[in-house]
Image: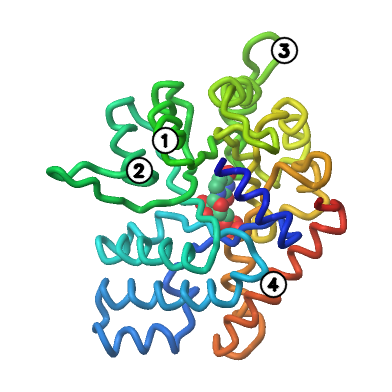
Amino acid sequence: MSFDVLQEKIIRMKNPTVVGLDPKPEYVPEHIRKASYEQFGETLEGAADAVFQFNKGLIDALCDVVPAVKPQSAYYERLGWHGMAALEKTIRYAHEKGMYVIADIKRGDIGSTAEAYADAWLGVTKVGEALCGGFNADCVTLNGYMGADSVNPFLKVAGERDKSVFILAKTSNPGSGELQNVAAGEGDTVYGLMADLIEKWGAGTEGKYGYTRAGAVAGATYPEELQKLRARMPHTFLLVPGYGAQGGTAEDVQYAFQDKGRGAIVNSSRGIICAWQKTGKNGADYQEAARAAAIAMRDDICRFIAIQ
Ligand SMILES: O=c1ccn([C@@H]2O[C@H](COP(=O)(O)O)[C@@H](O)[C@H]2O)c(=O)[nH]1
């Protein structure tokens, strides 16, 4: 099962982290941008090529120490179809290098549209007599606040193609409490009810480590809620964004893990891909800087958990 594959990579590398590939143009070192612009002009095509070259270099530098990458679709969508081609190539390259790929797309829509999204990101699309692959991520993020019918098409395709999903429960952003922490049910909260739904939607799909195909997003920036969610969702694998740039710490994310350091993966995007901005070498060392930052993050978190 898909989360078994992810858990096994984490155990093998003793690293429960994922690097977010969120390449804003200014995060891409100048020498990479310059080379792409020389070839394709200062165009969306040139910017998309720079993004892909940057990602490729990051993946090369990280693939033997980090189990997964999480490209955030927004940064590719803003570059139009060239950006989406760069995302597709990034996913393919990460797979070639043995990495697990979580596409951060946060989709949520009515069932018929959700079916199309599920085919696009996890499945295949029928074109004439042929079945054509889409982005082929291992896993996607979803906004499940539209209910079961918006999530089920993804779980169906995930079941057929051995993939998985992470559904927003308690997000890391400052405004997440406006709705998610509102009192609901009997002495409960909206995010608590969502947690129960996610456990229910995934029920029956447990893999060998006990996690279902329906994972949950729980932000590092709310350690109290994270702890409550971990206790309330024993069969749910957690994606934990918010470490580093958003202020979440290793002390905070320790609550995401179960026995043997299992059941969660912690994301950092800017903290890793922008590490070169702190070394004063103008990006010439972006690969070494990203690798050193990824190793430091792993070691920081592993002070609190022992992965087995
Ligand atoms: O609750 C959420 C859900 C998703 N994200 C995404 O994670 C990364 C975080 O980037 P950093 O640079 O490490 O802050 C980004 O892609 C978000 O869209 C999140 O932050 N919180």
Residue type at tag 3: Gly
Give residue 54's mark: none
Near-viewer residue (39 or 7): 7
Q: Is residue 234 above or below residue 72?
A: above
- Return the x and y of residue 256 as percentages of the image width and height: 75, 42
Judged by depth in the image, the label closer to the viewer, 3 or 4, is 4
Q: How many angstroms separate mark 4 from mark 2 (CA)?
A: 34 Å
- Return the x and y of residue 250 as percentages of the image width and height: 79, 55
Instruction: State the quadrant of the N terminus.
Output: top right
The extreme left residue here reads 128
Q: Which residue is mark 1?
A: 160
Q: Is mark 2 within 8 Å of ligand 1?
A: no
Q: Which residue is mark 4?
A: 293
Q: Earlier in the sequence, mark 1 or mark 2?
A: 2
Q: How many angstroms separate mark 3 from mark 2 (CA)?
A: 40 Å
Judged by depth in the image, the label closer to the viewer, 1 or 3, is 1
Residue at 48% over, 82% down = 29
Q: How many angstroms separate mark 1 from mark 3 (CA)?
A: 38 Å
Marks 1 and 2: CB-CB under 8 Å? Answer: yes
Q: Earlier in the sequence, mark 3 or mark 4?
A: 3
Q: Is residue 79 above or below residue 114?
A: below
Marks 4 and 1: CB-CB under 8 Å? Answer: no
Residue at 77% over, 29% down = 231
Q: Which residue is mark 3?
A: 187
Q: Residues within 10 Å of mark 1 (few under 14, many from 20)?
A: few
What secondary structure is found at the residue carrying circle 3? loop
Q: Earlier in the sequence, mark 3 or mark 2?
A: 2
Residue type at tag 4: Ala
